[in-house]
Image (spheres, grey):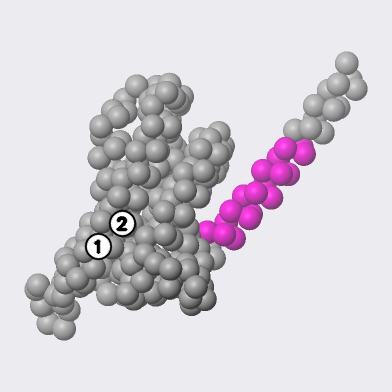
Amino acid sequence: MLELLADPSAWAALLSLTALEIVLGIDNVIFLSIVSGKLPVEQQKPARRIGLALALIMRIGLLFLITWLQKLEHPFVTIGSFGLSWRDVILMGGGFFLLYKGTTEIHHTMEGHDESPEASAKTAVFSAVILQIVVLDVVFSLDSVLTAVAMAPGMIAVMIAAVVISMAVMLWASEPVAAFVNRHPTVKMLALSFLILVGATLVADGFHYHIDRSFIYAAIAFSVLVETLNLIAAARRKRLIEGRDGEGV
């Protein structure tokens, strides 16, 4: 451990892995924000904290099972030139779940079945929300750990430190992100679109068609920038209208 602290390459790996884990964790935070928003207000924060705690435990546990984890990449069925592994099955299952969840949530929002937070919260069950979080945690953790192992092979302590730091950042960010998403319907719709995009990416990965994540996150960042400008413009119009109403009075 002391040798790692004095090793510049270990610090560089820690910074790189922490940044990577935070970026990969954006999907998790968005999903947590949406599914926890259907719970009663007093249960939303515990659900997000439990979800992130489970993600932390899973990622650290998987880091200690690297040998077993790498076996998941070995095909157990070969169809022509396509080899299907358990990793592919997990990625495809998680991707299809995100596609289903994102589509149904958009349907409920657009068709008027999500008229008020109180009405939707009554239909959500805490255990069901936690189960959904666990299912996606498995997928996100698998993807995250395999990427971390490829970037810093043999540096278990560094990988664990990066996971812990990134989870602390996500825990800090989860509350304001969830509040912001649930407060703005257009942002929620954008977040649901992100889930569908990520789901399609996971399904593509499961079929061995890799899509560079940098393109995905660049698209997300651009959409967020555009929506931010829209919100700023809407706030200015609102202040201008209120100012005119005040002058009229």
Q: Position of residue 187 (x, y in %)?
A: 54, 44
* Quarter that holds the N terminus: bottom left
Residue 226 lies in the magenta-colored region: yes
Evaluate if marks 2 and 1 touch, with contact meaning CB atoms under 8 Å apart. yes
Residue 218 lies in the magenta-colored region: no
User: Taking 249 as reference, is 70 above or below it?
Assistant: below
Element under label 1? Answer: loop
Residue furthest to the bottom in view is: 81
Instruction: Point out which mark residue 60 bears.
Output: 2
In the shown orientation, is residue 51 left or right of residue 162?
left
- Residue that numbered label 1 is attached to: 64
Say which residue appears at 82% left-offset and 33% top-offset: 240
- Which secondary structure dominates the residues rendered in magenta? helix
Is residue 183 at all visible to an observer of this figure? yes
User: Taking 233 as reference, is 160 above or below it?
Assistant: below
Say which residue appears at 86% left-offset and 21% top-offset: 246
Three-letter code, disc 2: Ile
Query: How many residues crowd around disc 1 within 10 Å: few (fewer than 14), some, or many (20 or more)?
Result: few
Three-letter code, disc 1: Phe
**Region in magenta:** 220-237
Query: How many residues crowd around disc 2 within 10 Å: few (fewer than 14), some, or many (20 or more)?
Result: some
Residue furthest to the top in view is: 249
User: Taking 191 as reference, is 10 above or below it?
Assistant: below
Q: Position of residue 181 (x, y in %)?
A: 52, 40
Say which residue appears at 21% left-offset and 64% top-offset: 65
Instruction: Point out which mark residue 88 bears.
Output: none
Say which residue appears at 36% left-offset and 64% top-offset: 157
Q: Where is residue 173 in the image (x, y as percent from the top left)?
A: 52, 45
Element under label 2? Answer: helix
In the shown orientation, is residue 206 left or right of residue 113?
left
* Quarter that holds the C terminus: top right
Q: Where is residue 71 in the image (x, y as percent from the top left)?
A: 16, 72
